[in-house]
Image (cartoon, grey):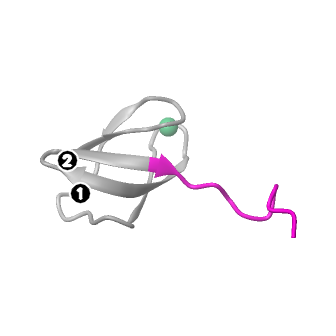
């Protein structure tokens, strides 16, 4: 399956048994991406925002 990195727009392979909620790392820029949707051969991901920066509590 393939996904596109939201950060650098690289397209890369993720494992066939990947599931929603799993975290994959972009091989190009090293961003951590959470799988939010799988449809057919395409995986949609969202960049994980690291907590503790602007969370302001
Ligand atoms: Zn990337």
For the point 32% across and 64% down, the residue is: 20
Could you tell me which secondary element the residue under label 2 belongs to? loop
Q: Position of residue 33 (x, y in %)?
A: 47, 52
The residue wearing badge 2 is: 1
Can residue 53 be found in the magenta stretch?
yes
Q: Is 52 left or right of 30, judged from the image as shown?
A: right
- Mark 1 Cα within 10 Å, few/some/many (few <14, many 20+)? few
Q: Position of residue 46 (x, y in %)?
A: 47, 49
The residue stretch that appears in magenta: 46-57
Q: What residue lies at 48% left-to-right and 37% top-to-bottom?
A: 6
| Residue 44 position within the rendered picture, expressed as x and y whole percent measured from the top left | 33, 46
Q: Residue at x 37, y 56 (%)?
A: 36
- Does label 2 or label 1 sit earlier along the sequence? 2
Taking the view exactly as shown, the residue that stands out farthest to the bottom is 57
Callout 1 secondary element = loop
Judge whether 43 appears above or below 53 on screen.
Answer: above
Q: Marks 1 and 2: in contact by CB < 8 Å?
A: yes
Mark 2 neighbour class, 10 Å CA radius: few under 14, some 14 to 19, many 20 or more: some
Residue 14, given in percent of the width and then of the height, sits at: 28, 51
Along the horizontal axis of the image, is 32 left or right of 11?
right
Q: Does 28 appear in magenta? A: no
Q: Quick check: 20 above or below 30?
A: below
* Res 29 → quadrant: top right
Quarter assignment of residue 41? top left
Circle 1 residue:
15
């Amino acid at each position: 399956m393939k996904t596109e990195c939201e950060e650098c727009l690289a397209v890369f392979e993720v494992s066939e048994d990947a599931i929603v909620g799993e975290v994959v790392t972009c091989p190009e820029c090293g961003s951590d991406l959470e799988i939010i949707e799988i449809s057919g051969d395409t995986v949609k991901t969202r960049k994980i925002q690291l907590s503790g920066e602007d969370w302001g509590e």
